[in-house]
Image (cartoon, rainbow, N blue to C red):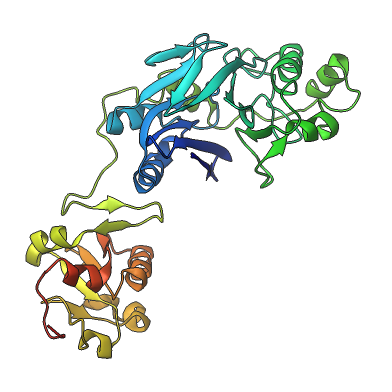
């Protein structure tokens, strides 16, 4: 079965797309963002998918790609357009190439005009296509820098994208109005730049009078993306917590497994956020745990030792996940949630105080 997720970076309004084959457990990412590599990796892990490749639709001017960072963490391959000018990729793709993940394929189509190296990726059954900045929802990428050409973009969109079946869903590289998806049929009729009875002359006149400002991050993003996201100087990977083996979740918080918490020992503060009746109830509590019910947590922050890591605990890991978020917002660093709560702790056979044997 095809796995599909549309992910978003609010800073640059960039969409990242995950496509996977659930039966074979393989996936690709289209246009990953550097700052969200941890998020994307968490989603892949939770869905049971191995990242094979990252694919770029073009050399971006508004964000730095996460391709290099994913490669460092997972060994995934980097694919970019052969004529993009980028260095450090594992595969330079060209029109007609196929990118495989499990039993599925993406076909590579050249759609230059925004940049020379713009690509559109079309799913094997032509049910969806990923257009980058060549075609946006009721719009398109600008053509006034990075080898841009309005004439080329007009031809690219009509010949390579709007020639797809009418029902084909189109997923853009960006959207600035909260829109997520369109279709070939919609864009043929309603795109004010390409649709209806417009011709190349109309399009060129439109694009030549956009008057857009210079992209704020262009001078940083373009050089970095020409290196596939690799930092210019040797730098360590983004910091990971060192006090225990933790897992970053797609929900956006660190979790610790019961055996890792037991191994961490007394270096960790355990904060149980259940009610007193639960703390002393049938499940018991972890030896040495501090009871601070959820509704008391904001008022009792001063009781925590800010120099020591904190693990939040509840019955199932649900309330304590929210407690971990609240502590993080309150400036408490090194916070993790006990995955599965007391239910998993007891099921794994770890020590408890009180409770029913």
Q: Would you say 13 lies left or right of 252 here?
A: right
Identify which residue is drawn at 45% across, 12% down: 92
Picture coordinates of residue 326 (x, y %)?
37, 68
User: In this view of the protein, can residue 305 be seen by the observer?
Assistant: no
Q: Is residue 227 above or below residue 298?
A: above
Q: Is residue 150 above or below residue 319?
A: above
**In front here: 181 or 112?**
181
The C terminus, quarter of image: bottom left
Rendered image quadrant of residue 130 = top right
Q: Is residue 234 above or below residue 251?
A: above
Picture coordinates of residue 110 (x, y %)?
61, 14
Picture coordinates of residue 69 (x, y %)?
34, 31
Q: Would you say 288 lies left or right of 36 here?
A: left
Picture coordinates of residue 12 (x, y %)?
56, 39
Identify which residue is drawn at 65% across, 39% down: 175
Identify which residue is drawn at 32% across, 28% down: 71
Rendered image quadrant of residue 337 = bottom left
**In front here: 113 or 332?**
113
Number of numbered discs:
0
Furthest residue in direction right, as rendered: 197
**In front here: 153 or 345?**
345
Furthest residue in direction bottom, as rendered: 277
User: In this view of the protein, can residue 326 be seen by the observer?
Assistant: yes
Identify which residue is drawn at 51% across, 37% down: 16
């Amino acid at each position: 079965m095809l796995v599909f997720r549309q992910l978003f970076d609010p800073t640059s309004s960039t969409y990242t797309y995950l496509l996977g084959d659930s039966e074979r457990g393989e996936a690709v990412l289209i246009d990953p963002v550097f700052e969200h590599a941890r998020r994307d990796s968490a989603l892949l892990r939770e869905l049971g998918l191995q990242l094979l490749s990252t694919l770029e639709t073009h050399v971006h001017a508004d964000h730095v790609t996460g391709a290099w960072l994913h490669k460092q963490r997972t060994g995934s391959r980097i694919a970019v357009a052969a004529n993009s000018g980028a260095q450090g990729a594992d595969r330079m793709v060209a029109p007609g190439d196929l990118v495989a993940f499990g039993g599925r394929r993406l076909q590579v189509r050249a759609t230059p005009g925004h940049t020379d190296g713009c690509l559109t990726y079309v799913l094997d059954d032509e049910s969806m296509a990923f257009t980058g900045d060549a075609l946006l929802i009721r719009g398109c990428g600008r053509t006034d820098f990075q080898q841009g050409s309005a004439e080329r973009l007009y031809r690219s969109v009509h010949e390579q994208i709007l020639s797809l079946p009418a029902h084909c869903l189109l997923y853009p590289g960006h959207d600035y109005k909260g829109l997520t998806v369109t279709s070939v049929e919609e864009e043929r009729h309603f795109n004010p730049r390409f649709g209806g009875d417009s011709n190349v002359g109309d399009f060129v006149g439109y694009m030549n009078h956009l008057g857009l400002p210079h992209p704020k991050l262009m001078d940083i993003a373009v050089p970095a993306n020409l290196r596939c996201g690799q930092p210019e100087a040797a730098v360590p990977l983004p910091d990971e917590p060192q006090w225990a083996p933790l897992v970053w979740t797609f929900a956006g918080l660190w979790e610790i497994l019961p055996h890792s918490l037991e191994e961490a020992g007394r270096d960790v503060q355990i904060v149980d956020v259940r009610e007193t009746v639960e703390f002393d109830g049938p499940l018991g509590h972890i030896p040495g745990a501090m009871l601070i019910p959820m509704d008391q947590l904001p008022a009792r922050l001063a009781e925590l030792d800010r120099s020591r890591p904190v693990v939040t605990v509840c019955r199932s890991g649900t309330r304590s996940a929210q407690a971990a978020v609240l502590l993080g917002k309150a400036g408490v660093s090194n916070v993790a949630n006990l995955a599965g709560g007391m239910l998993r702790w007891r099921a794994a056979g770890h020590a408890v105080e009180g409770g029913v044997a």
